[in-house]
Amino acid sequence: MSRVYNFSAGPGVLPEEVLKEAADEMLDYNGTGMSVMEMSHRSKEYEAIIGAAEQDLRDLLNIPDNYKVLFLQGGAHLQFAMIPMNLLKNGVADYIVTGQWAKKAYEEAKRYGKINCVASSADKTFSYIPDCSDLPISEDADYVYICENNTIYGTKFKELPNTKGKTLVADVSSCFLSEPMDVTKYGLIYGGVQKNIGPAGVVIVIIREDLITDDVLPGTPTMMKYKIHADNGSMYNTPPAYGIYICGKVFKWVKEQGGLEAMKERNERKAKILYDFLDESRLFRGTVEKKDRSLMNVPFVTGSDELDALFVKEAKEAGFVNLKGHRSVGGMRASIYNAMPEEGVRKLVEFMREFEAKHQA
């Protein structure tokens, strides 16, 4: 069977070149006579793999020397707790709730301190990004938290919030490496890699060194301390070794495509194809305010649950898979991450036109 066009929100599509290269190296990596899956993480060969991965990520994002790059486990969900455990000093943090994952992070953080919701778009089903230019930031807030790209609802912060001098913490899981970003505007950036970078099982944390201390909340487990991972080069325990190896290959692939500026241009072009169709369609419509649309996740509906279900079914039969919207909102969602070729988006739009011609009232 030929490969399908995979519009999954995560685990998401990976570059074919990376998958083929990994397949070629599955039984014998670089003359070692073994797979990276079987390799000791303490070996010189693996140290070279993780070292190159970190350096390539630093190159792509221009990460300053005073930031550590950590390859961790537990996904974004573990970060919902790890962040307040490590960063709460005054016991206060402000959260901007623009979707389900920001809401989960907010609810989890409330276990550890006085956590304030200073802005939310829940009033309109998270279909927009609230004005964050003059928020009631707490004077003693340890940090301000955002989910920069909302995978389920398809919104994206185009401007970062005015944190009034407080440390900005951002979950960038579904927009990681989709465009350039200025790391220095954040104290901590993190993302699960299974959307745009690699297989599920790795979460990358980029954290400013002054935030890495032994001064953590009482009872914080050793494995939940950023300092323990920073001091041990992400190898305090056995890391998700094979996942990091694939991430490293994706970093090299992004470099070969021309880096993050090239990725941004490519992603804007792909998104425009789909959004332009949705804006002119008589059957389908997007669900996000135009100014806040994500380049990565495009939710849309027909207005009929029955037609939505039929579209997802027929699309799958035609080779366009994982278009069903998140279970909490229904409808459809096309996730068009870096590795989704422009051809895939064009063919999806062709299919949508044909479906519209058959079913438009």
Image: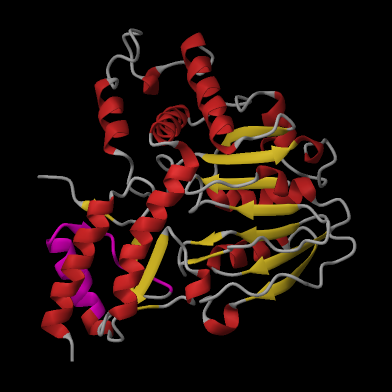
Quadrant of the drawing holding the C terminus: bottom left
Q: Where residue 280 appears, x then y in whole percent?
A: 30, 79
259 or 244, which lies in front?
Answer: 259
Name the residue at 77% across, 58% down.
112
Residue 312 in magenta stretch: yes
Which colour scheme appears in the figure? secondary structure
Tell me what residue is drawn at x 14 percent, y 69 percent. Answer: 314
Residue 86 drawn above or below residue 32: below
Would you place residue 143 above or below residue 360 in this image? above
Residue 90: which quarter of the image? Answer: bottom right
Relative to 83, say whether 198 is above or below. Answer: above
- Left or right, 180 with reference to 182: left
**What residue span does the magenta drawing correspond to?**
308-328
Res 319 seen here: yes
Residue 156 painted magenta: no
Q: Quadrant of residue 30?
A: top left
Q: Residue at x 29, y 72 (%)?
A: 277
**Horizontal and vertical percent for residue 4?**
19, 51
